Image (spheres, rainbow, N blue to C red):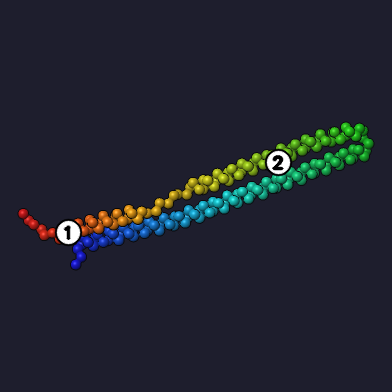
Amino acid sequence: MCSVQAAVAGLQIATTVQDYRSKQAVAKSQQKANAQTRKNSDQAYLDDLSKIDREAVSASREKKAEDFRISQEANKKEAQALNMNAGNGVKIVQDIAGTYDLQFLDVARDYETDVIKLMGQEDEAYAAQQRRYNSIKPVTMPSKTGMFLQVATQATQGYQNHQDAMKPKTTG
């Protein structure tokens, strides 16, 4: 027949094993959640970069279209002035070219501003990804060795308690 001390030791051991399994299941769930968080973070980062690339392409198209519009406008003004015989042809071209150069510089400055802003957005996107990665808590798997030591300690204690309970009581 089993003693109360042995039954208590058995329950302690079973509780320890179940506690280990429970901690292991929680740790594995957290690992899966962390992996999903990393995957989502990577996708968000790639989406941010894709958006930034689209904006860069759009800015480049705007610059090319504006450069073309300005050059066509300059050509038109030059042709009109030359066709009207409005004076010295060289001076007309120089005047229109000077206006064209200023407009070109304005477009170039606006484009450079857009590019600098986009570069800042890339840095922000990377920083956001790093913040998401840094917010992921590390997972600590429960220790099998720790569980075995705890089981051995409980078994030894249960055995000792059983031995003590079985000793004949001496009154002396």
Quadrant into which the N terminus falls: bottom left
Say left or right for 161 vs 75: left
Say left or right for 150 vs 75: left
Q: Nearer the viewer, residue 5 or 81?
A: 5
| Position in image of residue 40 (x %, y %) | 54, 53
Question: What residue appears at the point 27 percent right and 58 percent down from the top-left corner?
Answer: 12
Amino acid type of disc 2? Tyr
- The residue singled out by tag 2 in the image is 111
| Position in image of residue 74 (x %, y %) | 83, 40
Q: Residues within 10 Å of mark 2 (few under 14, many from 20)?
A: some
Question: What residue appears at the point 67 percent right and 46 percent down from the top-left corner?
Answer: 56
| Position in image of residue 45 (x %, y %) | 57, 49
Q: Residues within 10 Å of mark 1 (few under 14, many from 20)?
A: few
Quadrant into which the C terminus falls: bottom left
Determine the secondary structure under disc 2. Answer: helix
Determine the secondary structure under disc 1. Answer: helix
- The residue singled out by tag 1 in the image is 163
Say left or right for 119 vs 2: right
Most extreme residue toward the front, as rendered?
A: 145
**Number of residue marks:** 2
